[in-house]
Image (cartoon, rainbow, N blue to C red):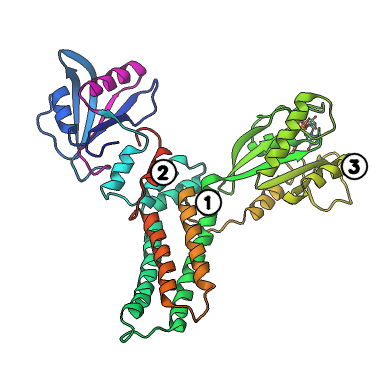
Amino acid sequence: MEKNDTIFAPITLVGNSAITVVRISGLETFETLKKITSIKKVEHQKVYVEYIKYKGKVYDHSVITTFLSPNSYTGEDMAEISLHGGYAVLETFLKLLKSLNLREAERGEFTRRAFLNGKIDLIQAESILQIINSKTEKSLFLSVKNEMGEFSKRIKKIRDDFLSLKSYVQSSIDFPDDVEWSFDRFKKDFEKIKMELDSFKSSISSGRIMDRGIKVVIVGRSNTGKSTLFNRMLKEERAIVSEYEGTTRDFISEWIDINGIPVNLTDGCGIRDTKDPIEKKGIELVLQKVESSDIVIFVFDLSKGMVEEDKKILKMIENKNPIIVGNKSDISDDKNFEGIKISALTGENLNLLNEEIFKRINFSEETIIVSAHQYNVVEKMFDQMKKIENLNSEKEPEIIDYHLKNIIDGFDMLLGKITEENILNEIFSNFCIGK
Ligand SMILES: Nc1nc2c(ncn2[C@@H]2O[C@H](COP(=O)(O)OP(=O)(O)OP(=O)(O)O)[C@@H](O)[C@H]2O)c(=O)[nH]1
Ligand SMILES: [Mg+2]
């Protein structure tokens, strides 16, 4: 990947549509436009309606928007060319750009340039990906907040507080005659910042949930109504339901929205003693899914009561502390069972189940959406915090200074002030082409 060449990529979905937009960014952008249109002088934020012409061939009728460096998304000279939708138009145009020595952009390269050119910090760059990947309205709004810089602002404030604490520690090392080292004084300031960081941590734990969603699996004996419940929660007839045991073989997963939280719901085959090898495999898969899930819903049939086989399954999954749900409340009641009783068929009491799921998600309303990379950095910062906390008062300021430096480095990594090529590659490779 070179820094200074001129790159291009379609920024809309490729296929039959009204328009396809191709973005060009870099030093040669406007020279290229001049070669393929009748544009003579390029102005900032101007719209041109132009035929694309090159060497006697007319390629398409287009609408071109231009942005002058540094006031563009990437910070470079940039143009967005709206062509008619469709494969042929796009293919031919991209081939033309290539023949003019422009390079196809890699995943996330436009946003990477925006970051490298100081248009956005790394948190904002990552939030752009979060906006694109948002699965619910709530996660979208929170991601937009990040993109607007709210997360960055909060991070910068805590970073500055750490910085002034570090400067006290450092002065007491460098100028011991002028600045007297007091562990108590240090500890008092440290505790204050720690409180801020703790509340930040609970916000990002919820943010992690928003970013990756919560995995919920429905398990139980055959024929207890798991697929009926799955469809009901999905509000769609997605899984096949029948009166026969062993209806579901493979598992199905779909995204649903519970109070704005993206939940990946999985329905699998019923667990029972079976000789059928396909069903056996299915049961194995369900148990694997249970292991990797965040929340398990165990369904039994109220009309049959909790039978031995139910208890056996419950034993198998007890480490997951499942939500136990009695189903088919419309046709019977089990007075001995005091848990959640629902009817997947009529939808009765489904809200109770949703509430229980939401309760278990442990979601804080003060949410900050974070990516896996950001979460890892914050975890490391907390390790350093713990190391400082575990120090006793005899400890030398040098050790504290060292840990504080690591914490501040963590903040700088989040903001992208310290960057490592491989981390940048990882972040931007999650973007799509054209972003
Ligand atoms: N009355 C009543 N019947 C239900 C309810 N939920 C499911 N059923 C019926 O129970 C039968 C089995 O439902 P499924 O949803 O296929 O059960 P399952 O647990 O997915 O079964 P397997 O895929 O075989 O493990 C069907 O005939 C459903 O119509 C309910 O709440 N009330
Ligand atoms: Mg089923």
Position above or below: 136 against 191: above
Position above or below: 57 against 316: above
Q: Which mark is residue 308?
A: 3
> For mark 3, does the 10 Å Cα neighbourhood hold few (<14), some (14 to 19), or many (20 or more) residues?
few
Q: Which mark is residue 396?
A: none
Residue at image coords 32%, 19%: 91
Residue type marked 3: Glu
Expressed as whole percent of the image width and height from the top left, the position of residue 226 reads: 75, 36
Q: Earlier in the sequence, mark 2 or mark 3?
A: 3
**Camera-nearest label, 2 or 3:** 2
Expressed as whole percent of the image width and height from the top left, the position of residue 70 reads: 20, 45
Whether residue 58 sits left or right of residue 20 in the image: it is left
Q: CA distance from mark 2 to mark 1?
A: 16 Å
Q: Which mark is residue 427?
A: 2
Residue type marked 2: Ile
Position above or below: 103 against 70: above
Disc 1, SS? helix
Q: Is residue 128 visible?
A: no
Q: Nearer the viewer, residue 69 or 18?
A: 69
- Is the residue at mark 3 in contact range of ligand 1, meaning its CB lies under 8 Å from it? no
Position above or below: 24 against 406: above
Q: Residue under circle 1? A: 208
Q: Nearer the viewer, residue 152 or 401?
A: 401
The image quadrant that residue 433 belongs to is top left
Residue 5 within the magenta-colored segment of the rendering: no
Q: CA distance from mark 2 to mark 3?
A: 50 Å
- Is the residue at mark 1 in contact range of ligand 2, meaning its CB lies under 8 Å from it? no
The image quadrant that residue 162 belongs to is bottom left
